[in-house]
Image (spheres, rainbow, N blue to C red):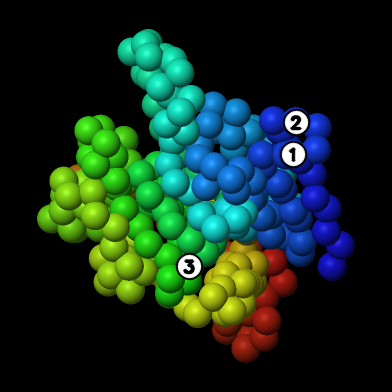
Amino acid sequence: MSATIQPLQSQAADQPILLSQDSGGVRTLTLNRPKQYNALSEELLAALQDALDQTAADRSVRVVVLAGAGKAFCAGHDLKQMRANPRQAYYEALFKTCSRMMVSMTRLPQPVIARVHGIATAAGCQLVASCDLAVSVEEAKFGTSGINAGLFCTTPGVALGRNVQRKHALEMLLTGETIPAQQALSYGLVNRVVPAEGLDAAVAELADAILAKSAAAIATGKRAFYRQMEMGLTSAYDFASEEMARNMTFHDAGEGIDAFIEKRKPGWRHE
């Protein structure tokens, strides 16, 4: 399969801060600030937002993998940059920008898989929680460590609290302690924990399972899932019933059901 690597935004001409690699319907976005443990600077947040916006409109992309370069997946916000701009208006704009990017991942038509090879703390843990799926190596650690520096991880808590049970989320937020990958798995923060040498294979296995399905059904299903999660039970069922009825009118639904009845592989239209 052919692959292209394109720098989306850079600190310098020879140092892209976000890499994009396409292969077989999978787009891998790699945070590329290894010396800063892939901290989310203004520039990296902007690059991620641009990449997500581009990806949302690209029908050739079926799955997105979010990865990190160097030792860490992501250590959170760039604290040095934040301290260099000590104004509340600046902080409000920064956190709104970050929140918009996190929400964009859930609104992306394509599923997003976090490839976690190292620590994911504060907004880095928020990144993992904001992805649709997550695969972690055994050595990775997760935490909302802001409280250790006198800053409660309020915005990471939004995503964390929607992934794990309340008391687990609050323990992480209140203590700032990191948890190992197996504990993150038991909490529901990640889907799978594998040895480091098996990380890419585990990510590929999930991606391939999605690639084998109808793109139209995946996109409408992901959108509906996040919308109904914000509703009460009755409203959620009303909305989901309408969405499922609409999905039944898709070409791929008819093709998939016919293929099941006829005991053959479906031929998705991939629209």
Residue carrying label 2: 12
> Where is 148 relative to 212, above or below?
above
- What residue does disc 1 label? 15
Residue 11 percent coordinates (x, y)? 69, 30
Residue at x 46%, y 28% (from the top left corner): 80
The Cα atoms of the two marked residues, 1 and 2, are separated by: 5 Å
Q: For the residues marked 1 and 3, what is the alpha-carbon distance in whole angstroms? A: 27 Å
Q: Residue at (54%, 75%) from the top-left corner? A: 196
Asked whether the viewer can see residue 125, the reply is: yes
Q: Are marks 1 and 2 in contact (CB under 8 Å)?
A: yes
Q: In which quarter of the image is residue 181?
A: bottom left
Q: Is residue 31 visible?
A: no
When asked about the image quadrant of residue 179, the answer is: bottom left
Name the amino acid type tagged 2.
Ala
Determine whether the residue tagged by mark 2 lies in a helix, strand or loop.
strand
Which amino acid type is shown beneath numbered disc 1? Gln
Q: Label 3 amino acid?
A: Val
Q: Which of marks 1 and 3 is in front?
A: 1
Q: How far is the residue under mark 2 from the one under mark 3?
A: 31 Å
Point 62% across, 88% down: residue: 263
